[in-house]
Amino acid sequence: MTSTDITDGGGAAEALLSATTLLRFATAGSVDDGKSTLVGRLLHDSKSVLTDQLEAVEHASRSRGGEGPDLALLTDGLRAEREQGITIDVAYRYFATPRRRFILADTPGHVQYTRNMVTGASTADLAVVLVDARNGVVEQTRRHAAVAALLRVPHVVLAVNKMDLVGYAEEVFAAIAAEFTAYAGALGVPEITAIPISALAGDNVVEPSAVMDWYGGPTVLEHLETVPVSHDLAACHARLPVQYVIRPQTAEHPDYRGYAGQIAAGTFRTGEAVTVLPAGRTTTVKGIDLLGEAVDVAWAPQSVTLLLADDIDIARGDLIVPSGDAPPTSQDVEATVCHVADQPLTVGHRVLLKHTTRTVKAIVKEIPARVTLDDLSHHAEPGRLAANDIGLVKVRTAEPIALDSYADSRRTGSFLLIDPADGTTLAAGMAGESFATTDRSAPADPEAREGDEAEWDF
Amino acid sequence: MSAGTGGAAQGLNDSPYALSHLDALESESVHIFREVAGEFERPVILFSGGKDSIVMLHLALKAFAPARVPFALLHVDTGHNFPEVLEYRDRVVERHGLRLHVASVQDYIDRGLLRERPDGTRNPLQTLPLTEKIAAERFDAVFGGGRRDEEKARAKERVFSLRDEFSQWDPRRQRPELWQLYNGRHAPGEHVRVFPLSNWTELDIWQYIDREKIELPEIYFAHEREVFQRSGMWLTGGDWGGPSDAEPVELRTVRYRTVGDMSCTGAVDSDATTLEAVIAEIAASRLTERGATRADDKMSEAAMEDRKREGYF
């Protein structure tokens, strides 16, 4: 990629300042699919690489004996990554266009792919899955689709790369897009947009391709700029995990007692009847402080402070919900987990479970299955999960927790399992049913799949 | 499949529930402050008087209002600070009734525990006073204003970053960070560095300062200053050892994009005397703030990573 024609446009600067929404997205791709080139192209063609960064890359490329600037050096931030020429860990990148700001979780496809992609996908509104047009949908592609589906990333982009190496042929693209869409759709991915690109030549990444006139859709960047980021909050169950109790105890505010937290889902209004879990006491919302400003209504993901009508015992770890719309509280958790640590998770393991702002002791009672992401088959009762394994677990907690299904809420349906001995994050958990909870290696019942898709709601 | 349609529900961007990017970032940072307040015993905010730490403090003030910020401040004083910045620091501490800890590089040099570098740069010397202060005060969570957009090693940093008893960062042994479930577990002697501004960019910081009308030290705005050139940067002379006889002093109209040790923080030529003008300049700039104004990052390709490994913030 040539990369010297960075121009400064005063007009571009003006426009940049008008961008007001934020999209978080993650990229996933196998080693040689051209992910670094795509990321480099997005950053470079959107003029997000600044002169000194480019000079540093050019300098480093030259000192390694390279001819042109190696844009992978833009994204490989660690000494070990540059030395080995691979990406080890998730990196976050920031860029903006006149229409939107972007936070990109750049996840390596090389090693430890599952936990890294899970990390990137957990906060993403969109995932870009890259495939090489010459190879089509391969095992790794199916894993990426499965992780995006499991983490319930709302939008998936299939970027069919290296179209220049297949003669920009429409039928090659169409066949890959159809195969991927069928696979990912069956897993429950709600929206899939397939785009034929050449990251190297720049086709359909930022600029529309001059050679693929048969493609009438958006470029990758255009799609990123226009995909919706807010969800229909009215349909969400309102949830506020209490983070911290604010009690100034000053002359000015002698009786102020506020329950601070970030609204995890839905909306809260003054005057609304609410219940505090797990104890189950009920009161009403007397006031809402939005960082110092009184408001009548607040919604996810705003950080707020709720003032309640009655003085009841509430502490960090409690969950405030609308009365009549409470999740069940239970000490038995069934979930799909991605194991993210090097030390294994075993049946009988004593762990800590962190759910929203609440951390409780727990024990792993059962590991009913390890799921093979390639074909979604189940390996029953594996006894343990190792790094990057996806599996099903049953966990018993020492105290009741108010857990939603992950399908209903990514925020209140997710949890961590933590090793109490050294604090290691062992596993990322998603409560309730997922595509992984049933063994898919056998031919699936088409009607059951329909049912799964209908439950997508967040 | 919706190939070719560019997404079905574009109208949702106009949802009354959509948050602006600044509101989204603010909400996320406040959540991080409150998590730390809820889970740690002795947190402290690293405060340099620079714009990032000023925004950090502003967010902390909002997070706990109308109560006080439940954290102290810690300033690592290199001994080569801009006087305007020290004055600002003391004013802020006074106004908000905060407690200030100071870790002094000069003090370490005077006691013979650190030796001045030949180039006069004290940035790398900050690490020892910082880490010893953390240990002595038993701080278990240390907020830093680092942003991932600043530097490629920082792009790899977690929001909660576990440090061992020597304050070392090991990028290969970082905990995966999932959803907004931050894991702050640590053993006695270890601590967690917390970066609530991880996802902010330089432009976000400036736009937020403008929106919230946050006061800044005046050196961030264009003013006439006696400076001299060294390694391509305009530096302010002083007791720290500049300029040499071969470095003529000029009177120029400049401002600072970052605030750090005087020996390695460069000024940029600028006419921007208002926030609006500064923002317009930043948006049009083709240089990153560190590339434009920090000498210490130019020492090697991995300068920041190496310093972070040793315990730098």
Image (cartoon, coloured by chain):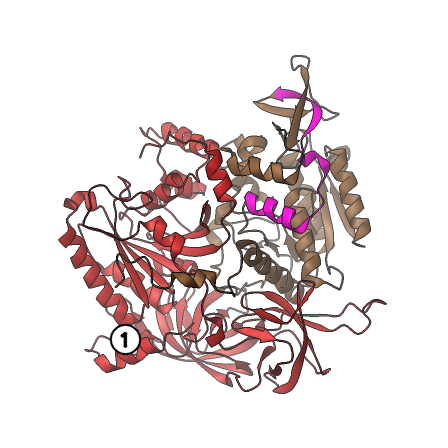
Chain colours: A red, B brown
Query: Which quadrant would the C terminus of chain B be assigned to in this image?
Result: top right
Q: Can you tell which quarter of the image residue A223 is in?
A: bottom left
Using the image, name the chain to which the residue with label 1 belongs: A
Is residue B222 highlighted in magenta? yes
User: Which sits in the foreground, A355 or A261?
Assistant: A261
User: Which sits in the foreground, B15 or B34?
Assistant: B15
Q: Is residue A190 visible?
A: yes
The residue stretch that appears in magenta:
B203-229
Q: Going 25% across and 64% down the picture, which residue do you hit?
A: B1
Q: Can you tell which quarter of the image residue A271 is in?
A: bottom right
- The answer to whether B48 is drawn above or below residue A181 in the figure is above
Q: Position of residue B312 (x, y in %)?
A: 60, 43
Q: Position of residue B54 (x, y in %)?
A: 68, 47
Q: Is residue B311 visible?
A: no
Image side of residue A257 versus residue A383, left or right: right
The residue pinned by badge 1 equals A378
SS under mark 1: strand
User: Which sits in the foreground, A199 or A120?
Assistant: A199
